[in-house]
Amino acid sequence: MIQRRSALAALAALPFAAGAQDHKPIRILVGFPAGGGTDAIARLLAEALQAALGTTVLVENKPGAGGQLAAQALKAAAPDGTTFFLSHDHTISILPLVLKAPGFDPARDFTPVAGFATFANALALSGGTPAASLPDYLAWVKKQGGQGSVGVPAPASVPEFLVKLLGEKNGLNLLSVPYRGSAPMMADMLGNQISAGVGSVPDLIANHQQKKLRIVAVMGQQRQGVLPEVPTFAELGIAGFEDLPYYGVFAPAGTAPAVVERFSNALAGVIAQPGVKARLTELGLSVGLMTSAQLAERERAYSAAWARIIKAGGFQPQ
């Protein structure tokens, strides 16, 4: 009888249980500033999830340190189904590889809920940069004495490793300029404070379409559907950036399987909605559901692949 009462009490505590608990607000943590691609994606999904879950779903931005602050906030949150973390690969897979003390361990502190998309990172040129392609840009940098500044959304990130590789491969001194997210990087690109930047296609696509900047190369094994005219880095002779990063949702460790399943099912329904899927596709995402187990495996594989690349590049955790 005691066990039955305990089970009923646990069920009542879940935010997705029947009755009044349906209206308990949910917050989705985002580790980057408002105005960036990740923020736009989170707000689009949050709005659609409200109807699917029957409760208020709020986006809470905790920018800083490449998503590290938001990840630490997720770790500290109660595993009661009211706090989730929407993140891409950088925070989950890369930060634990490049920081000695990130303050969280994804395998121990997080519960994968569901993945919903992959995307490509890309190199874009600022409007004032007199180059129309990646080869043109590299030639232009050589004429500037072989030195150039390239913005990246976060330090010790995949974009920063790409900049380093580009410089080494072409005998250039390309300096990575790290920002606290894509929004401030974009502001400097639009103001021609830096000649180029590397970020996700969702971050860059709108300004590319408005011809305020020019995307000249993308990661991945094939060209992106929203950018059929833009070659991949592999096409341009720069190998090693074929594996696409991912977007996923995570909960604190210890979150009940029923809560994870309910949120995952809701997310699956939302990304299948024609309007939502079309908008995510327009933002440069390849939409597709990964279950909790599939997301966990994707994170492990991606992390292992980048661990090899980072080690081979001689990068030391900081």
Image (cartoon, grey):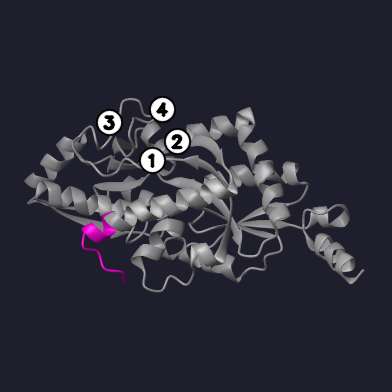
Which quadrant, please, contains the C terminus? bottom left
**Circle 2: is it few (<14), some (14-19), or many (20+) Cα within 10 Å?**
many
Q: Earlier in the sequence, mark 2 or mark 3?
A: 3
Q: CA distance from mark 4 to mark 3?
A: 11 Å
Q: Mark 1 sits on what residue?
A: 120
| Residue 300 picture location, percent across and down | 44, 54
Was residue 133 drawn as part of the magenta stretch in this picture?
no
Q: Residue furthest top?
A: 228
The residue type indicated by label 1 comes to: Ala
**Circle 3: is it few (<14), some (14-19), or many (20+) Cα within 10 Å?**
many
The reply to whether callout 2 and callout 1 are in contact (CB within 8 Å) is yes
Q: Does the image show residue 7?
A: yes
The reply to whether callout 4 and callout 3 are in contact (CB within 8 Å) is no
Q: Mark 4 sits on what residue?
A: 225
Q: Mark 3 sits on what residue?
A: 231
Was residue 316 drawn as part of the magenta stretch in this picture?
yes
Residue 92 as seen in the image, left or right of residue 82: left
Q: Mark 2 sits on what residue?
A: 284
Magenta range is: 309-318
The reply to whether callout 4 and callout 1 are in contact (CB within 8 Å) is no
Q: CA distance from mark 4 to mark 1?
A: 11 Å
Q: CA distance from mark 2 to mark 1?
A: 8 Å
* Local secondary structure at mark 3: loop
The residue type indicated by label 4 comes to: Gly
Q: CA distance from mark 1 to mark 3?
A: 12 Å
**Circle 1: is it few (<14), some (14-19), or many (20+) Cα within 10 Å?**
many
